[in-house]
Amino acid sequence: MDVIEFLPTLVQALLITAVFAGITVGGLYLVRRRVEPEALRTDHDVAGFTFGVIGAFYGVVLAFVIVAVWQRFERANEQVQAESLAVSNLFNLARGLGDPVRSEMRKELRAYAYNVLHSEWREMADGKFPPDQTPVQRLWEILFRAVPANAQEQVFLDKSIDQVTQLSDLRRLRYVYYSEDLPSVIWIVIYVGCAITLGFSYFFVTRRFRQQALMCGTFAALIGLTILAISELATPYQGAVVVSDSAFRVLAVSMDIPTPGGMARPGAP
């Protein structure tokens, strides 16, 4: 799936449908040429029971995996939104701090949001995103130097420390969701199960080959599309289906910084 992951979703679906259906129908053709149809008909009862058990088991495995990767994709999306909110909260809290802390914090937060949109999102898509906590460390260093002049600034400083702590955690989680894929054993089960399930469909025979080819090809296409969905959702920041950067784009407009392919809102505070 890695070879086609950057193609549009519709193109991926058409290719997967053609490949899975083509290979399955080709295998069916070879079996029908080598095995007499009557020999297969005599074993329909046993083959049907076995195929039902295997098909049900494989269906449960695919359902379990696709639900798991969808939930993981949704969590990754929620973490990005929470990260952008943490940056926004810090940007607003900085107004309650005295200079030079206020101006330094706002400068670093603008740089943080700009870097996420213009560099990190592309690096994650290309598989080159490093586990770099330097942007958060710069914020910590600014807060460490802060000396509150009154009780009000102390409150804003305490709240800012809480938000930087949350931002640090969320940034690490973004890297975790970016770098982790499904365990290899899951992919082995998926592909071996696919081969076994489709192979068992050859134990049946219809009066016309065209009818069975259509049924087997459709069955294979559905399995292929399900595997494609799992592959896309398993990598939230890579491929054709990715976590959106819209939360940071909205944040960038409010912070008066340019977005990729867009312009900043003039006159932002």
Image: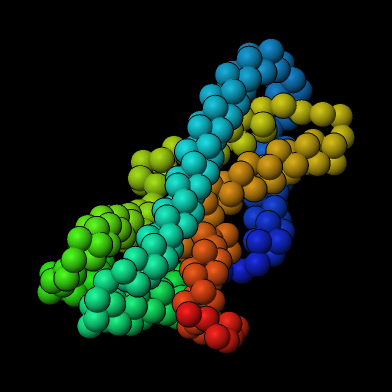
Q: Can residue 231 be seen in this view?
A: no
User: Residue 147: which quarter of the image?
Assistant: bottom left
Q: In this view, does 48 lie above or below 93?
A: above
| Residue 11 seen in render | yes
* Colour option used: rainbow
Image-quadrant location for residue 178: bottom left
Q: Is residue 12 left or right of residue 99?
A: right
Direction from residue 210 to residue 222 in the image, left or right: left
Which residue sits at x=71%, y=61%? 10
At a point 39% along the width and 62% down the height, the residue shown is 89
Q: Position of residue 214 (x, y in %)?
A: 80, 41
Residue 72 appears in which quarter of the rendering?
A: top left
Q: In this view, does 173 lie above or below 212?
A: below
Residue shown at the point (78%, 37%) measured from the top left: 215
Depth check: give the residue in front, 7 or 23. Answer: 7
Of residues 241 and 255, the one nearer the viewer is 255
